[in-house]
Amino acid sequence: MVLNFVLAKKETKLEKKPIQDFAHRTHRSPKEVRYLAEFDVPVDFGEIGAILVENEHRREMFIKEIILDGFELGPVRFTCESWLHPKKDNPVKRVFFPDKVSSPPSLFI
């Protein structure tokens, strides 16, 4: 499985080099398989607005979620709940957007 990060806001003057890595299986049970990828994200990369996923396996796979750890503001979670076809059947990368936590408006009394 190949993962690519996409910026939340496009830079107008400087193009950022895409960040890409392969995810490798780290756990397998009858109910789930876990993958791990390690990225070096430059401090000035910016906010991650989406992740592109490509399935290099021969069979489709169900992606429940993607969690990116190691950021100053905490983990970035992508709830996917989606089937991903193999690259040979559909070469278009799937796009997933991060979950946004919205707090309720403050009430002033």
Image (cartoon, grey):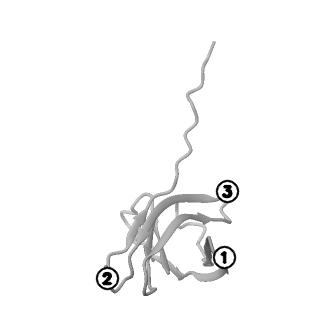
Residue 55 is left or right of residue 40, and the answer is left
Amino acid tagged 1: Ser
Amino acid tagged 2: Asp
- Of labels 3 and 2, earlier in sequence is 3
Q: Residue at x 64, y 59 (%)?
A: 75
The CA span between labels 1 and 2 is: 26 Å
Of 78 and 64, nearer the camera is: 64
Of 42 and 13, nearer the camera is: 42
Label 2 Cα crowd, 10 Å radius (few <14 / some 14-19 / many 20+) = few
Q: How many marks?
A: 3
Label 3 Cα crowd, 10 Å radius (few <14 / some 14-19 / many 20+) = few
Which residue in the structure is indicated by mark 2?
89
Mark seen at residue 29 = 1
Which residue in the structure is indicated by mark 3?
74
Task: Pinpoint residue 18: horizontal percent, then vertical percent.
Answer: 45, 76
Q: Residue at x 37, y 83 (%)?
A: 87
